[in-house]
Image: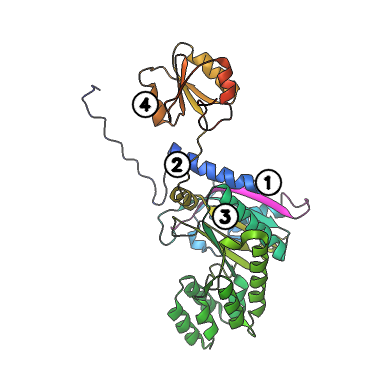
Amino acid sequence: MTSNSLPPAPLEHPLPAGMRDQLPEEAHARRSLARGVLRCAELRGYGVVAVPAFEFAEVLERGLGSLDTSEVLRFIEPESGEVAALRPDMTPQIARMIATRLLRRPPPFRLAYEGSVVRRRAARGQARRQLPQVGAELAGRAGLAGDLEILALVHDALQAVQIARFSIDLGDAGILRALLQGLSSTSAAALGDAFADRDESAVGALLSEAGVASPVLRELVGLSGGAEALREGQRLLRGTPAEGAAERLGRLFDAARNEGLDGSLSVDFGEMRGWAYYTGMRFHVYAEGHGRAVGSGGRYDELLGRFGMPMPAVGFAFDLDALGAATKHAGVAPDWPVRVLATGPEARARVELLRTEGVVAVAHDDDDGAEAYARAWHFSHVLLQDSLVELATGAAMPWNADLARRLSGRHANVVEGA
């Protein structure tokens, strides 16, 4: 190809709807976020586990919770002839692992994970079907203590990835469960959907259709805020079957404030998604720069029983794409390590020396194009002959063997003042 000719047109190799590639910059940013969250979990004693990309459908669907089975991508597993499914949620897999592989270990079980889930249909308002997640599950610790542990982990993880402005909106699935007792499963499901849509008029119409006179339910749809909203909700629910759940929400809110989570907490009596799956605390996490929740979680004390090992459990998951959008909005740049592109006759020997010190290093044959290549591939430095140049500042320093050691583990401004 001559210098004046145009490059060939890119070949068209479309991906399935809702699937997408990630280029090095995007993948690096996602991995950095996941590492930050997992590091927080590990510091609190959570062991990181990995689960299969697919399992037998009967096992996965046993613990789907609020997900519709129509969202599961199924296929016939060739070796067994059984119906298998790509995982649409990792929590059932963690539950299965606890009830089988970890059966003989004492509770509580503290487990963290990272991976993608795949759903047949994209959720409303988004085009993705493959959802990257990082999260944690705590099984065997009941009530307020377990709820607070998870909330504190969520709070610290958000700070670790440098999201300073966020809100943890608390609810309690027990409220709607109690208020919908006695209704047919069809009516209860329809009311749950209306709550999820924040549709007060639909809630009223469904209540009338079911012959239920409950103005409290209509008032709860839009009730959210701080301590005042909490006390108002408790007042509305006093004397109803949901009074106990409302009081439980109040104890959690007050305890979380005492633990230092005050500035990020609110309550939302209208947030009832997953009420049939969750048994107590339910929360969503919102951050500036992203319209949807960047994470969610709650207590699901009935799940482990479906796998033959009844046990209280609570957990959460962050959507890594949403979390990435929030960090980008906050001006948080991915933390690239020192990466050196070396040229010249001594390049290969110097690269080996840098690598022994744990520094990312690559030998490059084209001296003239080294800087352009380095910038395109996020190298922080170029070693040109006997001079190490920091691309961000243009600062240069004479190369010597001791410089490799001094570069090791450094992330910024490694030339100036080295």
Cα separation between marks 2 and 3: 20 Å
Amino acid beneath label 1: Leu
Q: Is residue 114 magenta?
A: yes
Kind of residue indicated by mark 2:
Glu
Q: Which residue is mark 1?
A: 43
- Residue 372 circle label: 4
Q: How many marks?
A: 4
Counting residues from the start of the chain, the first of labels 1 and 2 encountered is 2
Task: Let me know if residue 342 is in the magenta part.
Answer: no
Q: Amino acid at mark 4?
A: Ala
Label 4: few (<14), some or many (≥20) within 10 Å?
few
| Crowd tier of the residue under label 1, counting other residues whose Cα lies within 10 Å: few below 14, some 14–19, many 20 or above | few
How far apart are labels 3 and 4 at the CA level?
39 Å
Q: Which residue is mark 2?
A: 26
Sooner in the amino-acid sequence: mark 3 or mark 4 = 3
Residue that appears at 63% across and 84% down = 240
Question: Residue 335: image x %, image y %?
Answer: 51, 38
Looking at the image, the residue that sits furthest to the front is: 417
Mark 2, other Cα within 10 Å: few <14 / some 14–19 / many ≥20: some
Look at the picture and state if 409 lies above or below 169: above
Which is more toward the observer, 46 or 291? Answer: 291
Point out the tag, 1 or 3, that comes first from the N-terminus: 1
Q: Position of residue 119 (x, y in %)?
A: 48, 55
Q: Is residue 297 visible?
A: yes
For label 3, count other residues whose C-alpha is less than 10 Å away and answer few (under 14), some (14-19) or many (20+): many
Numbered disc in front, either 3 or 4: 4
Numbered badge on residue 317: 3
Distance between the alpha carbons at the discs numbered 1 and 3 = 17 Å
